[in-house]
Image (cartoon, grey):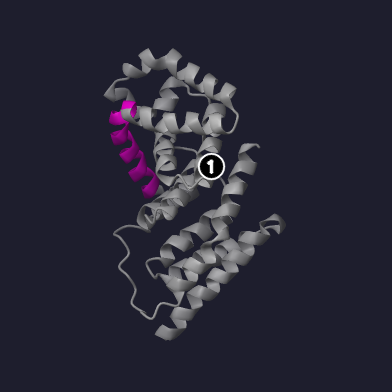
Amino acid sequence: MNNKESIQKLLNKTIEDEEFIINAIANSSSTDTLPLPENALESAESLKIKKTLEIKEESKNFSKSLDIGLGSIIQALNDQDKSDEADDIIDWFEEHLDRMANITPEEIEKESFGKIMNFPLSYLFLMHQAITHLIDLEKYEEAQGALTFCLLLNATIPEIWFTNGVVLQKMNKHEEAIYAFGIADALNTKEDPYIYAHMARSLMTFKLWQEAEEFLVKAVNLCQENDAELLVYSQNLIKFCEAPKQRME
């Protein structure tokens, strides 16, 4: 399964059980709007800068992230009968361990670990596929640790930020999910209906019906023929958004 197919599998799984959750939120008897966490909808560019700085701060704990994140990824690859690929990744880190241990704080301020070490993108996408396997198994804590590790290596891949947002949603960390989807959107070279639909999903947990509906309309307008499930999903969520808005009028 290639990276695109792996992402599509993740998206399809995410869509499966959302209707029950959203229906419960949208038909809540309360019409109060929950306070949105401060700056949750700040501009995409400032989001990217904010998270980049956070990642650089987390880079100081790279060895801990290496133990936790890479361990989960290697196990997931072995579970998928990709032991050869897992061995290749382990060999790469073992070969570069001395250099990684001597990376200076000044270097981290300028570049990510992955860029400093010229970490192969092919390995990064392979690691991302392993993370989707963890999500399939509903091992969200392990997936989160693995995603943090991937972002320390390279924080410029929108697919990884999107997957991070999906995992955060599964963990009911919707404020952080909003940030992750915002960064995925900022890094993407074109507008992505999946990002907008999932952004709306998290906004709805704060009962921000109008903002959520705006993202959903964008998602619907961007859907292509092969996005049939997402189209239906987004259209249903628009209906859910309209119900509480009507009660407030």
Residue 213 falls left or right of residue 226: left
- Whether the magenta-drawn stretch holds residue 49 is answered as yes
Q: x, y (%) of residue 33?
A: 34, 73
Residue at coordinates 57% horizontally, 28% vertically from top-left?
122
Looking at the rendered image, the quarter that the N terminus falls into is top right
Q: Amino acid at mark 1?
A: Thr
* Residue 235 percent across, percent down from the top left: 59, 69
Question: In the image, is residue 57 above or below residue 86?
Answer: below
Quarter of image, res 64 = top left
Q: Is residue 217 above or below residue 144?
A: below
Quadrant assignment, res 104? top left
Residue 68 forms part of the magenta stretch: no
In the image, residue 135 lies at what x, y percent? 50, 45
**Closer to the camera, 232 or 210?**
232
Q: State the quadrant of the C terminus.
A: bottom left
Q: Is 184 located above or below residue 28 in the figure?
A: above
168 left or right, relative to 78: left
Front residue of this view, candidates 48 and 147? 147
In the foreground, 129 or 202: 129
Q: Secondary structure at mark 1?
A: helix
Residue with the most extreme right position? 225
- Relative image position of residue 63 (x, y in whole percent): 33, 25
Residue 42 can be seen, yes or no: no
Residue at image location 37% in from the left, 52% down from the top: 176
- 27 is higher (above) or lower (below) than 222: below
| Main SS category, magenta section | helix
* Stretch of the chain drawn in magenta: 46-63
Residue on which disc 1 sits: 132
